[in-house]
Amino acid sequence: MDSPTYGIRSIRQPRFKALCPSTTLCKQDKSFTLSFDVTMILHLPPTQYFFMASHSPRFLSLTRRAFSSSSSSSLGGVSMVQGASRGIGLEFVKQLLENDDKELVIATCRNPSASTGLIHLKDKFADRLRILPLDLTVESSIEASALSIKGTYGRLNLLINASGILSIPEIMHPETTLNKVEKSSLMLAYEVNAVGPILVIKHMWPLLKAGGGNGTGRSTAVVASLSARVASIGDNRLGGWHSYRSSKAALNQLSKTVSLEFARKKDPITCILLHPGTVDTDLSKPFQRNIAPDKIFSKEFSVQKLLSIINNVKSHDNGKFFAWDGQEIPW
């Protein structure tokens, strides 16, 4: 007798069938036990599945399982880092991969082929790291990334918005006086620091609702956007940096607003903002001269602290703004 062929069929997608040749079927006490190679379904959407064993010409119905609640937790979470080409974003990708050998990580940036750091991580974590192009200034690019993630994973459990712009040589500089404020700098800062991240949240929203906290140990999915203490209106005592301050303050307001919508709709998503401290990156390097050395953090230290906040976040933290040490920052 030929060996039977077993497949997986989604309740929500009855036409979908993924063959698992390594599946075996055993009869035990008039019931059937199904075993299969879990790697075969690693990237299936988190929904309910029932398993069909076919032995031509008859079909034998086996059992229905809640894939999203039990099996998904054994597979780990699916995390996305937007702005992952270098600096803090790249370090987030690295630590997420190193900290959990079940974590699937999606790294996005405008030009992945130019990121030697991501290429190196891909060589090391080929089976758990996916790199996607995403231009933060083009909404269709953001939407395309969301559709790609939906088709492969069907969910997200963590979204980190790590992009940020403070200065560009010969193009944009932090303003020290009102006389140096330019429309082009303001618009660019708002586009990268506020508009882009909120559009990423918009298009990843269905995936975050689908993922919730499944496979992570958290009660909800988490959206963590990198802000800055200088975005605080109540804590602004020095002025200056008009474009950067105001664009990050806009990100804070937008994030707070969507957090209220998540709560009102009872979506399993917690939205927080994070201040990483002054970190030794390309963004801060031109402005480190007047900062005490012990106040400048390494990327490794800052991301370790931020991930600790993310991993311990509770639903009542929704809409809050935290510094790297876990202290709340006033709006």
Image (cartoon, rainbow, N blue to C red):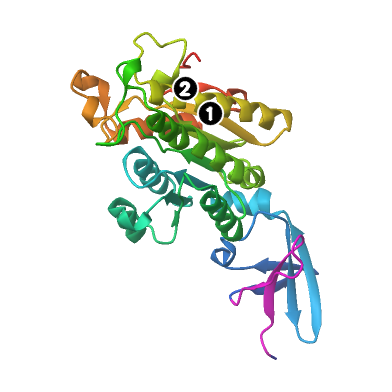
Q: Which residue is mark 1?
A: 272
Is 8 on the left or on the right of 162, as rendered?
Answer: right
Q: Which residues are magenta?
A: 2-21
Q: Residue at x 45, y 22 (%)?
A: 246
Residue 75 position, x and y percent, is 55, 53
* 243 to 88, vertically: above or below: above
Residue 63 position, x and y percent, is 77, 63
Residue 105 position, x and y percent, is 46, 50
Q: Residue at x 33, y 17 (%)?
A: 179
Q: Residue at x 70, y 55 (%)?
A: 47
Residue 310 position, x and y percent, is 49, 32
Q: What secondary structure characterizes most of the magenta part?
A: loop
Disc 2 marks a residue whose amino acid type is Phe
Residue 253: tell me if it is visible: yes
Looking at the rendered structure, the secondary structure element under dot 2 is strand
Query: Foreground residue, 109 or 247?
Result: 247
Query: Foreground residue, 218 or 283?
Result: 283
Callout 1 touching callout 2 (CB < 8 Å):
yes
* 183 to 8, vertically: above or below: above
Counting other residues with Cα less than 10 Å from the Cα at mark 1, is it few (<14), some (14-19), or many (20 or more)?
many
Total marks in image = 2
Disc 1 marks a residue whose amino acid type is Ile
Q: CA distance from mark 1 to mark 2?
A: 8 Å
Residue, far bottom: 1
Q: Which residue is mark 2?
A: 322
Is 51 on the left or on the right of 215, as rendered?
Answer: right
> Quick check: is 46 in the magenta stretch?
no
